[in-house]
Image (cartoon, rainbow, N blue to C red):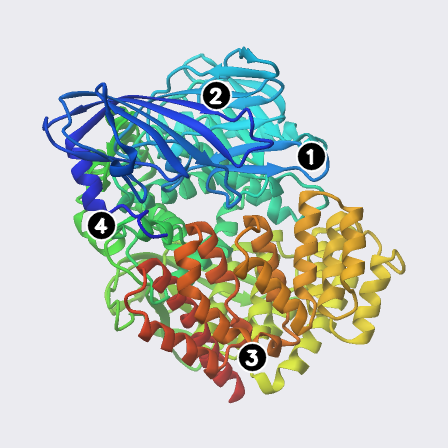
Amino acid sequence: MPGENLTREEARARAALLTVDSHRVDLDVSRAVDEPTFPVTSTIVFECREPGASTFLDFIGPSVEEIVLNGHSLDPATHVADSRITLPDLAEHNELVVRATGRYMNTGEGLHRFTDPVDGETYLYTQFEVPDSRRAFPVFEQPDLKTRFTFVVTAPADWAVVSCQPTPQPKPACDGVATWAFAPTPPLSSYVTAIVAGPYERVEDVTVTGDGREVPLGLYCRRTMREFLDADELFAITKSGFDFYEKEFGLAYPFEKYDQVFTPEFNAGAMENVGCVTFRESYLFRSKVSEAVVERRAGTILHELAHMWFGNLVTMRWWDDLWLNESFADWAATTSTAEATHWTEAWTTFATSDKSWAYQQDQLSSTHPIAADMRDLEDVAVNFDGITYAKGASVLKQLVAYVGRQPFRDGIRAYFAKHAYGNTSLPDLLVELEATSGRDLGEWTRLWLQTAGVGTARLALATDDEGVVTAAHVEQTATEDHPHLRPHRMAIGIYDVAADGTSLERRDRIEIDVDGARTEAPELVGVRRGNLMLLNDDDLAYVKVRLDDVSLRTVLDHAAGLPGLPRAIVQTALWDMTRDTEITAHDFVRFTLDVLGADLDATSLRYSLARLGTAAHLYSDPTRRKELRLEVADRLRQHALDAAPGSDAQLQLVSTYATFASTDAQLDEIAAWLEGRDVPDGLAVDTEMRWTLLSSLAAGGRADAAAIEDERRRDATATGRERAALALAARPTPEAKDEAWAAAVDDDTLPNAMIDATATGFLRCGAHPELLEPFVARYHDALRSVWEHRTQAIGESIVEGFYPVLLADERLLQATQSWLDANTDAPQGLVRLVGEQRDAVARALRAQARDAKA
């Protein structure tokens, strides 16, 4: 990725120099079916505050044919280098025309092209965040150079063409080709513009905004996915979001229409393009999925809709305030899911999933403040992480509680009204919140937004012989690298074992303000201690929690005894304690296996199973790991057979059991289910379940390439192709691992989705981690070349997806540390990702050592 970076200082200098009045893009995709490239012309009108100065335009593509600045031609041979087009001797008022050739991508960046293997149809969509509009057209690629974009698209006449503005009536251009001339947009940053083109199917609806406008709603997907487009559900969630956000933000939806497009081979969950949101196609469910995934889809829909106000109407000046976009959208989506949909326990889901992600990210060597220092585009690309999203949302939740919901609401409304269609930074928001709340947020901002790391809190108690508390205080600690002790509003729940001997019931709850290393809790003095004293009950604070010895033994012995949110808090606490070597991996595995018998909500079950896998495969004592895996497989099987027929729990437990199955008897059972024999009552062996079972057989050495190819023919779709790649890579042979590596790492033609699938299968070798040993050296040897020659998205996929983490031994740790020591001059984005892999192995080794002592 050489020559494609942009620094914050360069962007600031360019923004200080220019104002962009308009930008017209003429894009011709009429030959997208046959040609690898496309012609594109950008016509840009802009002002320069220093006539005679120079600047540059951004473009990544095969060639630039013509540059005309204020009527004078500039030679591309001398004015184009790397990703920049030099523009010298600017006038006060400038008109620029650049005619260029772009390349269709198969990486999920820029203008992505996909061919449906079922019917051979071609589909296009754009993905521009962070810096990839420059792959589709020449542009000033930075968020604070907003302008009005006019897109004129020439495409096959029978295609649908969608962008940020309502789709106009196409005009015939030539045989079988038409042109769509879209109206100019409001002022937008280039990264939230979009073009979607292809024979997409459309379903229409309409919603009425708070100011009385009818806003058209559209859903788009590929023709071969139309049967899976559950339009009624998707529109219902969308409309609930419109109603909630308009009331909450005090501002009607600010754009003319709202389309949602489900796209193949999409890298992220979704992207908030103005009026043209793109989603990953897996959100159209071909088979039965867990309710956790259905809820996640609803949250994603509401997250992207929130961006229409926070991020699109008002946009960060530079990527330092990326967190404002993403944290706000996460907070808003969770709030609206809880208050405007039937998923009323959305904050429990957040505590189980998102917040746990934040805690883990915040303990890596790459941790950073929520308001991160984004020096350049490479910094930005690797900061779409648990801190930017989930920690930020957690802290916003605290801020809402601190200033009050109504003052927060009033401040946001004033912020939108003052800065509509403009660019801002954090102080612009704080000014409004301080005005509406009457609070000085300076110290709060310093402690919560401008420092890194997560603290740890534990409750210290003294009791008399009757169990009555005689003294109590909360101890707070921080790490040496990030020694910040932050203030918290924290609840303490007092739980007793119920008369049934199984359940835990909350007897009482107090709230205190925790600040500093020690905070007295006099409210507990004189109270009989509970079997469980749960610090941070109701999940008010962002802090790791430790359980005292009595409470720890209680939850280990009564794993299934707690209701949703307190159980999520306890599970997260135990997971943190496992990762920090305060309890053993074996104890955590057995606690989790016990809790699986409870009536867990879908998301809690999903994350319990994921943590179970990590503890068993990475954190357990290697000398006892085989026996532990067998125990896990047997217990999972029994839980699956005991689950209610057709239930969400049955689906998740069977799927996870399949990943642990390794004995002949277990694999025989998996094979029987795949063949439709002795299938548990209620289990739907549908398309996705067939792939789950077949992948298990492949990883167990019981399904060869021919069997996988037969299944691929049965499911001759794009998803079937990806599932087959996963299964092939999962086969437990050196040859299969070599083939996977060659296809994804050595060859640069595999599409993004196939790389991700291949990486998943490559690491599907928990029973045979030794298969990865030859790749320790190959991985480290390939890093610099991969980062240099592949795109940002593909580079990240390979660096993270092909790290042989399942080895988790001293040799791997030393190899990775040696690479870091020898490559201090490597791009910082690459160094960060490799450092995070090193951190994962170092933590696993500490956990293994603790488990070995048990």
Vertical position of residue 776 compared to residue 289: above or below: below
Residue 654's x, y, as percent?
73, 60
Query: Could you say whether the residue bearing mark 2 is in a helix, strand or loop?
Result: strand
Q: Disc 3 marks which amino acid? A: Ser
Q: Is residue 655 left or right of residue 485?
A: right
Residue toward you, 482 or 520 = 482
User: Which labelled disc corresponds to residue 445?
Assistant: 4
Picture residue at 12% right of the left edge, 32% below the top = 53
Q: Would you say the residues marked 3 and 2 are in contact, meaning their CB atoms lie under 8 Å apart?
A: no
Position of residue 55 relative to residue 366, above or below, is above
Label 4 crowding class (10 Å Cα cut-off): few <14, some 14-19, many 20+? some
Q: Is residue 78 above or below residue 489?
A: above
Q: Residue at x 63, y 19 (%)?
A: 158
| Mark number displayed over residue 153 | 2
Residue 191, image x and y in percent?
37, 35
Identify the residue at horizontal 45%, vertical 56% (top origin). Answer: 796
Q: Earlier in the sequence, mark 1 or mark 4?
A: 1
Cβ atoms under marks 4 and 2 closer than 8 Å? no
Q: Compute the Cα span from label 3 to label 4.
A: 40 Å
Asked whether, in this view, residue 271 is left or right of residue 407, the answer is right
For disc 3, the marked residue is 620
* Badge 3 or badge 2: first in the primary sequence: 2
